[in-house]
Image (cartoon, rainbow, N blue to C red):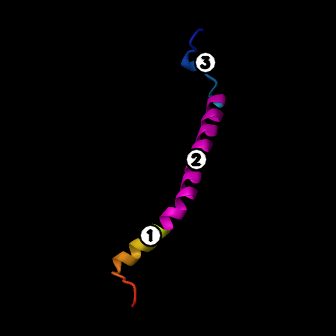
Amino acid sequence: MKQPRFWEVDLVLLLKIWAADMGTLLLTAVAFAAMAVPVIIPTLILWYLYSINWTMPR
């Protein structure tokens, strides 16, 4: 199969494929961030409590 030269490439099609790939990447990043929220929130709470040297009242 003959390799196309760079000036024969359809730039509109290439841009559409690139936009679809960026959309997939963005969706993956959003899904990763959404799944990380249940871990991040308690971590931040514990980090805050540790930073103010909080202890359990007796």
- Amino acid at the residue labelled 3: Glu
In this view, the mark in front (1 or 2): 1
Which residues make up the magenta segment? 13-41
- Extreme-top residue of the structure: 1
Q: Which residue is drawn at 61% across and 42% down?
A: 24
Residue at the disc numbered 1: 44
Q: In this view, does 33 lie above or below 49?
A: above
Label located before the other in sequence (3 or 1): 3
Magenta part mainly helix, strand or loop?
helix
- In 3D space, how far apart are the residues under numbered discs 3 and 1 (Cα atoms)? 53 Å
Image quarter where the N terminus lies is: top right
Q: Position of residue 22 (x, y in %)?
A: 58, 41
Instruction: Verify whether residue 55 appears in magenta.
Output: no
Crowd class of label 1 (few under 14; some 14 to 19; many from 20; radius 10 Å): few
Residue 58 x, y percent position in the rendering? 39, 91
Q: Is residue 4 left or right of residue 55?
A: right
Task: Return the x and y of residue 39 as percentages of the image width and height.
Answer: 50, 62
Please name the residue that numbered disc 2 is placed on: 28
Placement of 31 over or under 57, stated as above or below: above
Q: Which residue is the site of mark 3?
A: 8
| First along the sequence among labels 2 and 3 | 3
Residue 35, numbered circle:
none
CA–CA distance in space, label 2 to label 3: 32 Å
Residue name at image x 60 percent, y 38 percent: 21
The CA distance from mark 1 to mark 2 is 23 Å
